[in-house]
Image: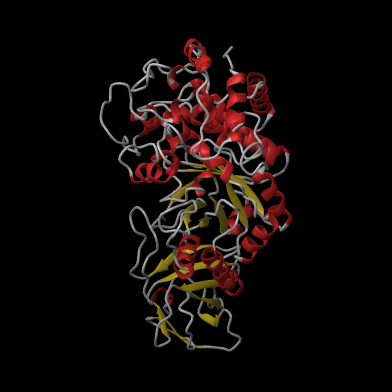
Amino acid sequence: MRSRIPTVVAAALAALAACGPGHAAAAAPAAHSVHRIAGSDLGRPAASAPQGHGAGWSVHTFPPLWNEPKDYEQALHRQMHRVDATIRRGPYQASWRSLEAYHAPRWFRNAKFGIFIHWGVFSVPAFQNEWYSRNMYVKGSDAYEYQRAVYGPLSKSGYKDFIPKFTMSKFDPKAWAALFRKAGARYVVPVAEHCDGFAEYDSKFTLWDAARMGPKQDLVGELEKAVRADGMRFGVSSHRAEHWWWYHPGTRYDSDVDDPRYAGLYGPAEPMHLPGDHSQGEPNPNQLQDWLPPSQAFLEDWLARSTELVDEYHPDFVYFDWWINQPAFAPYLQRMTAYYYDVAAARHQGVVLTYKLQAFAAGTAVLDIERGKTDTLRLRPWESDTSVSLSSWGYVRDDKYRTARSLLTDLIDIVSKNGDLLLNIGPRADGTIPAPVRAILLRMGAWLKVNGQAIYGTRPWVLYGEGPTQAPKGRDNGQAYTPRDFRFTQKPGVLYALGMVRPRDGKASILTLYRSTPYLPGPIAQVRLLGDPHPIAWRQTPDGLDVELPPSASGMPYALAIRTRPAAGHSVH
C-alpha cells in the first residue's frame, strides 16, 4: 500500500486558496521526513535516484505524487478492475492482433474537419507557447528569465500561482460550439490534461483540476454538452504521458517544484535521461528508448486517468501526444485501446483513437501527423493536426496567425490524401477566443459553405492531385501553391477538382483529365464551378481539361464538379 499525506494536500489547497502569484505559503517541515520514508514500492527504475536536489527531500523518493485524493488507492483499484473486467468480456482484447479488427468509423471519414483546443493555466502568462510551464524552470531559457523578471524568484512564485488567474470567467460553451459549427467543423477536441498536470475536467485521481481550482467548473463536461447539442462529435486529448519528466528542471535548484505541498501538480518530475547518460539537453525525440522509462505506478495512473475520460465523457475521439511512443507504454496502450473500443462497441459508438509515429501497430488506430502531411495518398484514414498560430498551441500575447487561405489549402491537400484536419485554437485565460482567430474560422466556414460538397463525405480519387507542389518534409506552416496545383476528391458519379490557386487570366488546365485518360469511365459531360450558378466554358482535349473561370478577387481555392458519360461499351458498376 502506498502511503498518502492528506494533511499536506489540505495545506496545499489552503495555500492556493489564500494566495496569488508571488505569495506561496511557507513549507511544512513535518512533511519532509514523511515523504522521504515512504514510497519504496513505486516500481520505479532503481536508477531514478535523487539528482541535483536539496538535502530536505526528493521527488524521486515520493510515493505516487499524484495520489492526493483520500480514496486514491481505492479509486485506482476500482478503475483497474473495471478496465480488465470489461476487456475480458468485450470483443477487443489487449493485444495488437485483436485490435487489428478496428475500422475507422464512417462519421470520421465523412467529417474531414475538426477543432482542437489548447486551453490551460499556461494561457495566464501567455508567453512564447504552451511549454511555458516547463520552460519557466529551465535555467537560461527565455521563459525562465521572463518568469523571474515579471513574477520573481521561482522559490517564491511558480506555475501553481497562475492557477487562481485561470478563471475562464467569460467561457460560453454554447457560443463556442456555435462558432465551431459556423467554421465548418464536424468534431471538437479539447485538451483534457496537458503536460503541465492540471486537468481541465473533474477527476477522481487528482485534486489539481479545473473543477476544484481556477475556473471551478468541469470545462470538458460543459463543452461536451454544448458541442453535442449543436450536432457535432466530441473528443478529448491527453498529454499526461509527458508529465513524467515535465518539471524535472525545477528540481535542480531552489524552486517550488521541490515543495512537497505541491507534489500533486509537479510530481514525479523525473529526469529525461537514462541513469548513465550524462549528456545535456533533450534526448533524441524520435528514439524514446533512450529516455528514462516511467514507473509502473505512473503507468497505472496514466491508464486510470485515460479510461476515466472514456467513462465520464464517452468521447467519439481520443488524441494522445507523442510520448506514448516510449516502449514502457506499449502494454498499457493496448489495455487502454481495448477498453475504449469495448466500451464503444457496447454503446454502438464508432470511435477514433489517434497516435503519432510508431506507437501503435498499423491498422489498430488512426495515425496523426503533427504540423505536417503525407506526400502520398494513404489507403487507411489518417489525420493531420496543426495550429492556427504559427508558433504556439496555447494562447500567447501578440501571436502571429496563419491565413484562412493557407489553412484551406492544407485541408484540401489532406482530404485528397484520405485524411482529416484537426485545427487547433488557443483561448485566453478568461475563456474568450481572440478576434483574429474567430475571423479566420468564420472565413474558412464561409468557403466551406459554398465548396463543402467537395470536402465532406468525399473519398480519395485514384490520384490525389497533380502539379509541382508536394508536401514538405517536417514541420509545415503553410505551403505556397501554384495555379497548376490541383487536388481531387470524389463522390458517386462526380469528381471534384480543387484548384489551389486561381489563375490570374482565368485559364486553368488539368493535365490528368486529357481526353483518353484511363482514370475516367468516359468522356467529360459537364463541368461546374461550385458557388457559381452560371455555366463556364470548358474543353476536354488530347492534352487535358481546359477551363475558363470568371474573374474573382477572393484569392481563395476553387472547386470544379466534373461529371462524365460512360464510354461506348463501358459498363459502370
For this view, does 93 lie left or right of residue 469? right
Q: Residue at x 46, y 36 (%)?
A: 157
Q: Position of residue 70 (x, y in %)?
A: 66, 21
Which sits in the foreground, 395 or 151?
151
In this picture, is 212 found above or below 468? above
- The image quadrant where one finds the N terminus is top right
Residue at horizontal 49%, vertical 63%?
A: 411
Between 448 and 156, the residue placed more toward the observer is 156
Note whether residue 15 is visible.
Answer: yes
Residue 345 percent across, percent down from the top left: 69, 39
Residue 121's x, y, as percent?
Answer: 53, 44
As drawn, the residue found furthest toward the left would be: 279
Residue 382 spot, x, y in % from top left: 50, 51
Whether residue 68 is visible, yes or no, is no
Q: Is residue 558 above or below residue 342?
A: below
Above or below for 147 versus 383: above
Q: Can you tell which quarter of the image residue 107 is in? A: bottom right
Quarter containing the C terminus: bottom right
Q: How many marks?
A: 0
Query: On the image, which quarter does residue 203 sit in?
Result: top right
Q: Is residue 469 left or right of residue 63?
A: left
Front residue (pair 167, 444): 167
Instruction: Between residue 356 and residue 561, name the one nearer to us.
Output: 356
Residue 228 located left or right of residue 33:
right
Where, by quadrant of the figure, is residue 209 drawn?
top right
Say how the picture is coloured.
secondary structure
